[in-house]
Image: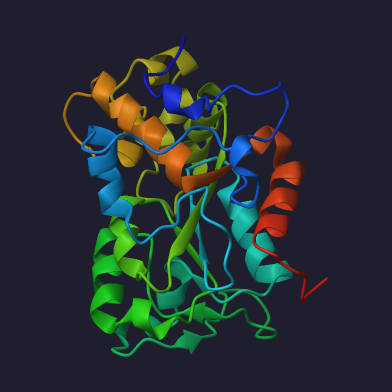
Amino acid sequence: EQPQDAPPVEQPPQEAPGQVIAVDPAAPAGDAAVAPTASGSPQESILGLLSNFKDTWDPYDNSDIPMFWHIPKAGGSSIKDTMGGCHRFVQATEFGVTDGHGAETEVAIVYPAVPGVADTDRSPFVNIDSTTVAGIARAKQMGFADANLAQLVVSPFVFETNDLFTPTAKGRLFSVFRHPIERAVSMFYYIQVADWEPSYKPELKDWTMSEYATSDIVENNWMTRQLSNQLGGELTEENLNKAMEVVRTKFLVGLMSQIERTMSRVEKFFRMTYHVN
């Protein structure tokens, strides 16, 4: 049975099977997906809430800050590990407020200790949490955007993170999409064992997949809600249209099923080079 969380937005614009779906802003104009939307449209209105993010057709600039939209159970942890461990980027994630850094009042680069790991070769983070609404508000209050310290921002939020950037230091959104059914199945097994997560539900070990798919625990169009800026209430066709327009206009998109090609394209687009083997 198909879970409720099967938003059409997870099926990006049609291209050849097996191809990483992405719009390269450096490509000639003829290669762009579609021209910008008509003035005054609902899509244009919602895009105004993302004014501190570059459009996909804008040329790349060295001042662009990569903003990884972390979709649950879609390879996000691997992306973060690559960015931190291989590229050695200064990241803005939830890890920046660990090891006592959440109480600091001035934005700074910190090197939190990893619990249970030898205290050597720590990775750099900014001392804010970009993965919660409260953390984003704190980062804004601390002047995160003007400090321009992060080389990569990671968050499950889209519109809320607009405040983490400025018109002169814009963010550039990218993400990794996964088939919605595969993602729902992975989530089902994950929350059975992930006792460190707020969503931990060990009782699901006794459930069937069908019971989970028809329960109120399964996600309800999480991606469409995030992308259309409507977290509650009923969704309509307009929400879907808004979500697809946000993806088309703002995102470099890769596929978890093509994760190596995805990483290669992201690295090439952002001119990333390895600093640690």
Q: How many marks?
A: 0
Q: Image point 69% across, 84% down: which residue? A: 121
Q: Which quadrant would residue 119 be assigned to in this image? A: bottom right
Q: Which quadrant would residue 79 be assigned to in this image? A: bottom right
Residue 55 appears in the rendering: yes
- Judged left or right of residue 234, residue 218 is right
Q: Is residue 133 above or below residue 250?
A: below
Foreground pick, 273 / 169:
169
Horizontal and vertical percent position of residue 241: 33, 26
- Judged left or right of residue 38, residue 175 is right
Q: Image point 50% across, 45% down: which residue? A: 251
Q: Is residue 179 above or below residue 274?
A: above
Q: Image point 69% across, 69% down: which residue? A: 85
> What coloring was used for the rendering?
rainbow
Horizontal and vertical percent position of residue 145: 36, 76
- Judged left or right of residue 269, residue 218 is left
Q: Residue furthest left?
A: 233
Q: Is residue 223 above or below residue 134?
A: above
Foreground pick, 234 / 14:
14
Question: The C terminus appears in which quarter of the rendering?
Answer: bottom right
- Judged left or right of residue 32, residue 49 is left
Horizontal and vertical percent position of residue 9: 44, 27
Residue 22 appears in the rendering: no
Foreground pick, 65 / 54:
54
Q: Residue furthest right?
A: 277
Horizontal and vertical percent position of residue 67: 48, 59
